[in-house]
Amino acid sequence: MIIEVLYNSVMIQQLINDEKFTNIQKAQAGLTRLFINAEKTSSFYRVLKNDQSLGVLVPDIIWKSLIEDLEALSSPIYRGRIAKSRRDKKTYTSAQIKKQLGL
């Protein structure tokens, strides 16, 4: 449970770190440039108008990754495997994992 809380905390912090801000005028004037910059920096832009959030510009590569994660997490079989793995107290070294993956 503690590990899950820490993991979620780290993931939330990572999202916050990846967030940039722009106003609607800059977004309208340079949409392609914003997407290119966001992809290069693995970040996304929150678009504001009068300090109110209108939405988020997410590069396609990040969007596809998020969709893949959501699809995986919507699978009961996948979630079951995660739960089983978390109950298993056996641990593996990074060397063992690399060997299993052929790295």
Image: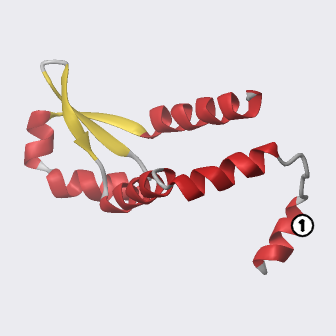
Height in image: 28 above or below 61? above
Q: Quadrant of residue 33?
A: bottom left
In this picture, residue 18 sits left or right of residue 23: right
> Callout 1, which amino acid?
Ala
Q: Residue at x 14, y 50 (%)?
A: 30
Q: Position of residue 73 (x, y in %)?
A: 50, 51
Quarter holding the C terminus is bottom right
Q: Report the residue at 82% width, 71% height from top.
A: 98
Query: Is residue 85 rendered to the left or right of residue 29?
Result: right
| Residue occupying image coordinates x 80% and y 43% | 87
Q: Quadrant of the N terminus?
A: top right
Residue drawn at the location 49% of the way across and 55% of the way down = 75
- Give the image location of residue 20, x and y in percent: 35, 36
> Which residue appears farthest toward the bottom when viewing the image?
102
Task: Give the farthest residue toward the top.
Answer: 51
Which is nearer the eye, 81 or 51? 81
Q: Residue 85 in the image: x percent, y percent?
A: 76, 51
Give the residue at mark 1. 95
* Label 1 SS: helix
Vertically, is 58 above or below 61? above
Q: Nearer the viewer, residue 59 or 21?
A: 59
Coloration of the structure image? secondary structure
Left or right for 75, reference 9: left
Q: How busy is the neighbourhood of tag 1: few (under 14 within 10 Å), some, or many (20 plus)?
A: few
Q: Is residue 16 left or right of residue 32?
A: right
Q: How many labels sit on residues?
A: 1
Q: Position of residue 6 (x, y in %)?
A: 69, 30
